[in-house]
Amino acid sequence: MKAFHKILVQRYCSPCGELLLGSYGDRLCLCNWVDEKHPGRVERRLQNLLKAVYEEGMSDVVQEAAGQLDGYFRHERTAFDVPLLTAGTDFQKKVWSMLLEIPYGETFTYGGMAERLGMPGAVRAVANANGANALSIFIPCHRIIGSDRSLTGYGGGLEAKKFLLELEKGTGRFPFL
């Protein structure tokens, strides 16, 4: 594959793990965990779909994203307004769009998402689309829990997911366990 474009990437140290932020043009296309469940899978897929390679460097979008994450972790921000670029199938994009509708501090289930999509049998496909999300936190896949209200898989690990949900609940403890 010959790459024609660049994704400018920069590391971001969050209180619950290190993230890799990336921009493609003037939009954020990557906010993924450095230590993740399936190392490199999200990044390879993103590079393939955008026909781009990573290059370490700062961009205005990455700088703005880092600043907005700082505000989020300080409880000063409950929503993001960085321009996003999603790269995936139409189904994945529908799932990611639904994730953006889940309010700060609330959770939803994979089954509930499948039902809202009019595809109640597609729970596993919804879970896979969540796992393919390259814009963690900005597209809040951490807000999806199991139908029994348990924590389920998360690219950044269950401890990071627990941390993010506790942060958004503002309780200092996880309310679902």
Image (cartoon, rainbow, N blue to C red):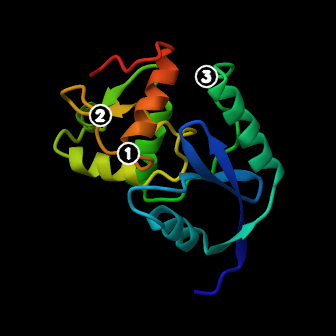
State the image quarter where residue 74 is shown.
top right
Could you tell me how far apart the alpha carbons at marks 3 and 1 are, in whole angstroms?
20 Å
Count residues near mark 3 (Cα–Cα under 10 Å), then give few for <14, some for 14-19, many for 20+: some
State the image quarter where residue 70 is shown.
top right
**Mark 2: amino acid:** Leu
In the rendering, which numbered label is found on residue 154? 1
Q: Which residue is mark 3?
A: 78
Q: Quadrant of the C terminus?
A: top left
Foreground mark, 2 or 3?
2
Percent position (x, y) of residue 136?
Answer: 52, 44
* Marks 1 and 2 in Cβ contact (< 8 Å): yes
- Whether residue 103 is visible here, answered yes or no, is no
Could you tell me how far apart the alpha carbons at marks 2 and 3 are, in whole angstroms?
21 Å
In the rendered image, the vertical position of residue 177 relative to residue 84, given as above or below: above
Could you tell me how far apart the alpha carbons at marks 1 and 2 are, in whole angstroms?
9 Å
In the rendered image, the vertical position of residue 112 relative to residue 103, given as above or below: below
Q: Which residue is mark 2?
A: 151
Left or right: residue 152 versus residue 170 is left
